[in-house]
């Protein structure tokens, strides 16, 4: 499965509410990976990076989440 940082980056990049099935399609994962992805998103919510609504998850904008996104993008851009 993808890491929590991959999921966070995908939700942040999307910019809108994102559902778990959408994320599974983005990462080309089977529906059997739903529970694991959902639990990872819940952990990100507990860390204060995401917020959950009835439609799905979206980024909770804060200085911490913005810094994390910039760090992830830097790493991706530099193949780290």
Image (tube, rainbow, N blue to C red):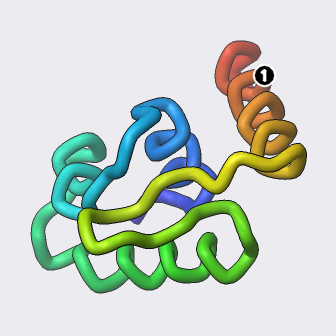
Measuring from the top left, give residue 45's x and y in whole percent. 60, 74
Residue lying at the far front in this picture: please name it.
54
Locate residue 66 relative to residue 30 in the image: left or right: right
Q: Residue at x 54, y 39 (%)?
A: 12
Q: Position of residue 11 (x, y in %)?
A: 46, 46
Residue in the image at 68% along x and 14% along y: 77
The relative height of residue 47 versus residue 10 in the rendered view (above or below) is below
Residue situated in front as seen by the camera: 61 or 76? 61
Q: Which one is nearer the viewer's eye here, 61 or 27?
A: 61
Q: Is 12 rendered above or below residue 31? A: above
Q: Which residue is mark 1?
A: 74
Rendered location of residue 79, percent (x, y): 69, 21
x then y, percent, for residue 34 = 23, 76
Q: Is residue 5 left or right of residue 2?
A: right
- Against 63, residue 79 (above or below) is above
Crowding near the residue tagged with mark 1, few <14, some 14–19, many ≥20 C-alpha atoms within 10 Å: few
Task: Please identify the quarter of the rendering in which residue 9 is found.
Answer: top right
Query: The N terminus is located in which quarter?
Result: bottom left
Q: Name the side, left or right, on which 28 lies relative to 61.
A: left
Residue 67 occupies which quadrant of the picture?
A: top right
- Which residue: 44% across, 84% down? 39
Spot the residue most to the top. 77
Q: Secondary structure at mark 1?
A: helix
| Residue for point 17% across, 47% down | 25
**Quarter that holds the C terminus:** top right
């Amino acid at each position: 499965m993808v890491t929590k940082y991959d999921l966070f980056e995908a939700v942040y990049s999307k910019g809108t509410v994102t559902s778990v099935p959408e994320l599974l399609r983005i990462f080309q994962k089977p529906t059997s990976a739903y529970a694991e992805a959902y639990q990872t998103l819940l952990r990100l919510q507990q860390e204060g990076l995401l917020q959950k609504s009835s439609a799905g998850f979206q980024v909770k904008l804060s200085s911490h989440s913005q810094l994390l996104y910039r760090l992830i993008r830097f790493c991706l851009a530099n193949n780290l």
